[in-house]
Amino acid sequence: MTVGDPCFALRMTGIRKAFPGVLALDGVDLDVRQGEVHVLLGENGAGKSTLMKILSGAVTRDAGTIEIDGRVVSIESPRQAHDLGVRTIYQELTLVPHLSAAENVFLGREPRRAPGIIDARRMREQTEGILASLGVRIDPGHAVRDLGIAQQQMVEVAKALDDRARIFIMDEPTSALTDAEINELFATIERLTARGAGVLYISHRLEEVSRIGQRVTVLRDGRRVATHDVRDVTIPQLIRLMANRDLAEHFPKRRTMRGEELLRVVGLRRRGVLHDVGLTVHRGEVVGVAGLLGAGRTELARAIIGADARDAGRIFIKGAEVPMRHPAHAIALGVGFLPEDRKTQGLVQTLSVVDNIALPSLGRWSRGGIVRTSRHTEIGRRLVQDLRIKTLGLQQTVLQLSGGNQQKVVLAKWLAAHADVLIMDEPTRGIDVAAKVEIYELMNQLTARGAAILMISSELPEILGMSDRILVMRLGRLVAEFTAAEATQERVLQAALGHAA
Amino acid sequence: MIASFGGRQLGTLFGLIGLCALLTVLTPHFLTISNLLNVTEQTTINAVIAVGMTFVILSAGIDLSVGSIVALTGVVLGSALHSGVPVPAAILLSLTTGAVCGLLNGLLITRGGLPPFIATLGMMSIARGVALLFTDGRPISGFSAGFREISTGRPLMIPAPVLVMIVVYVTAHFVLTRTTFGRYVYAIGGNEEATRLSGVRVGFHKTMVYAVSGVTSAVAAVTLTARLNSAQPIAGMMYELDAIAATVIGGTSLLGGSGTLVGTLIGALIMGVLRNGLNLLGISSFLQQVVIGGVIIAAVLVDSLLNARSQRRRARIAPSPAPTAGSAEGITR
C-alpha cells in the first residue's frame, strides 16, 4: 500500500496530540478501508475519544497526516471534517427532541420552495427515501422524542448520510440498545459499508468485534499496540492487549494497619442504576472501585452520601445505622465527597480559596450565624501549607488555580470539616504527573492518620497502585472483589468487561 | 473575591461622579443642598428594594414581584393604621406580609421546582390583584403625623428615609459578608451543586433569600406610604425593573455569585441622579425613558466587554498551567 492508495477511505499516520500534562496520542497509525468496519478498542483514557475528536475536527492534532480517499487533507474544524465526508455519531445524540425526524435530518439544509419557505413535502419524501435505504421504517413526521433510542440513532445516521459521507465514526453506538435494536443497527451499518463507506467503530463490547468488524485496533496509553484481522484474534487476547499498561508511573503506596470499620453499605439500590450494592471501608484502608464508564461508580458515590435518592439500602457509620439522605448528613457524620468534576461540583469557582475550604464547615465554625473570618484564615492558611497548595494567597479565586491545586482545595475542604471517610471520584483526573503523586502522598497521610478512602478511578494502574482492596462494578452491580495481592490489570479488566477468566 | 470595594465598584463610582460633574456643568440647580437631599430621598425607595434584589440576583435568581409586594404591603399597612392599629404593630404586620410573599416565592422555587422568573411573575400578578381586591382599587389616605415622621422626620439632621436606607444597607452588608447565610448566598449563586455537595441546605437558604426580598420591599412600602401620606394599590408599578437595573449597574452578575451591596447603592444613586438631572434639564418624561434605557444597556455592555477581554487574557494563560503554577510557587516560597 502506497500513499495515495484510493482503496483506503481513511488513513492516519503518526497522529500525535498532547494536552497539558498528558500525551493523549503518541504517533498513532490507523486506516479504514472502503466498505470496512474497523473496530477501535481501548481502556478508558487510552486515546480513543481524542482520536475521534481529531477526525471530527473538534480537536486539532499536533502532528501526523490524515488522508481521505487517498488525498492528504487537513482537518481544522468540525465544518471542514463534515465537508470532507467525515460523519460522527456521538454517544449523546444531537437531535432536537420536539422536531420531527424529517426536520432533524434536514436541519440547517432544508429544501426550499422559495427563499425562506421550506418544502415540507420534499423534505418528508427525501427523508423517507433515506430511511428506507437504511432499511428502517420510521414515520418521518414523528417527533424524535417519541422514538426509541435505536430509532433516534437511525435518524442520526440518516442525518449524517448525504452524497459526500465517506467515513462514519460511531462511539459506542450499542451502549443503550437492546439486542433486537443492535441487530437493526448492524444491518444499517452493513448497508453503509455496502455503499463503500468506511466505519470506525468504537466499542467496549468485545463480543461485537467479530460480529461487525473486519479489523480491530487496540489503543493503550495513546499508542497503537496492535491491529489484527478479527478472525485472527480471540477475546482473551484482546483483553490482554488492552490491559498490560506500563506500570512505570510511580505509586508511592504505603500500607497501614486496617482498623475498625468506618463505612458499611448494605443492599443499595437505585432503579436502573444500582443493583444491590454492598461494601465496607475500614480505617487505614483505600478501597478502589474500578469499572467502565457508565458502570454506576459515580452513582454509587452519590447515592451513599445522599446526593441522589436511594430506592433501598442501609448505610452504617462505625457500625451504627445512619439516615444520610442529604449531603449535609454525610458531612455531619464525617463523610466527605470529592466529585469527579471539580469545576462543576467540587468548587465554587467564583469564591476564594479560603471561602471554598470553609464552605462545609461554615455552620460549625460560626457563632450565632456570624462567621469568624479569623478562624477561616487560620485554618485555611494551615491547610494551604500542609497540602502545599500553590496559590497567590487565601483570597485568590479558585478559578485561577491549576487542576492539581484545585483538587487539593477540594481535599482541604474535607480535611477542614474533619471528614474521616473520603469518597474520591477520579481524584487525579486532568492533573499533571507531579501533582498526581502529591495527591497519592496525601492519601497515604490520610490513611496513616486513620481515615478510610473509597477511591473511584478509571485508571487501572492507579486502582492497582493505590488500593488495598479492589471492587469492580459492571452495569450497576459489584461483580468482583480482589485484594491488592490478587489483582492484576487483566483480571480487573476482565471483570469490568464481563468476561470472567 | 467579595471585597466590599473592588475595581468594578470603583468604576461605577466614577460613573456616578462623572454624571454628577456633568449635571453640575449643565445646570446650576443640580449641586445644591436641597436638590442633593431631594435626590437621595427619592433614591431611598429603589435603593432599599434593590437590597433584596441583590440578595436574589447573587443567588442566581430574579424577583419580579417586588413592585407588587410594595403595593400589597403598603395597603396592608394603610388599612391597619386606619383601623387603629398602633404604628409599630402596623409596620410589623406589613413587614410580615412582605416576608410571607417572599417565602411563597421561595417555596414555589425550591419545593415546586419553578424557575424564579415564573414563580415571581405569578406573585407579581397575585400580590397586585390582592392589593386591588383588598382596597377595591381605591387608595387609603391620610395618616397620623406620628406615622408621617417616617418621611418628614430629621433625626440627627438626616432625613428619616435616608436613615432607614442606611440602616438597611449596613445590616444587609453585615449579613452578606459576615454571616453563614450571606456566605451561602454567594456560594449558591456561584455553584449550587457544589454548595449542595458541601452539605449546605441550599433549598432553605434560597427560600430565605426571597423572604429577604419581600421584607425589603415592605420596608420600602413603609417609607413610600409615609411620604405620599397614602397607600395605593397601584403603587410600585415597574419598581422591579428599577431595582434590577440598580443591582446590575452596580456590578452584580446576573449569573449569580458575584456582586456587592456597595455597588448596588451606587447603581441606585446613578438611577436617581439621572432621573433628577433629566428633570432639571427639562427633558420630557418620554425621552427620559429612552435615555435611562440606554444608560442601563451601556453600563452592562461596558461590563460584559471588559469581562470578555479579561477572559480572553485568562484563556491565553490557561492552556499551559505549568508556568502559572511555577510563578505562584515562586511567590509562596
Image (tube, coloured by chain):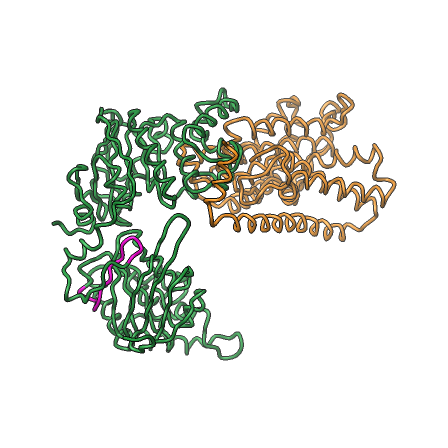
Chain colours: A green, B orange
- Counting from the top left corner in percent of width and height, residue B119 is at 51, 44
Q: Is residue A137 above or below residue B160?
A: below
A477 left or right, relative to B216: left
Which quadrant, please, contains the N terminus of chain B?
A: top right
Q: Which residues are magenta?
A: A210-223
- Counting from the top left corner in percent of width and height, residue B264 is at 64, 37
- Total numbered labels: 0
User: Given the current orientation, which residue lies at the most extreme left position?
Assistant: A501
User: Given the current orientation, which residue lies at the most extreme right position?
Assistant: B28
Image quadrant in which you'd find residue A182: bottom left
- Counting from the top left corner in percent of width and height, residue B191 is at 47, 40
Image quadrant in which you'd find residue B222: top right
Answer yes or no: is residue A22 visible: yes
In the rendered image, residue A211 lying in the magenta stretch gets the answer yes
Q: Residue at x 27, y 27 (%)?
A: A317
Q: Which of A115 and A412 lies nearest the eye of the viewer? A: A412
Q: Residue at x 79, y 35 (%)?
A: B38
In the rendered image, residue A337 lying in the magenta stretch gets the answer no
Image quadrant in which you'd find residue A345: top left
Answer yes or no: is residue B75 visible: no
- Counting from the top left corner in percent of width and height, residue A137 is at 28, 71
A356 left or right, relative to A444: right
Q: Is residue B51 above or below residue A363?
A: below
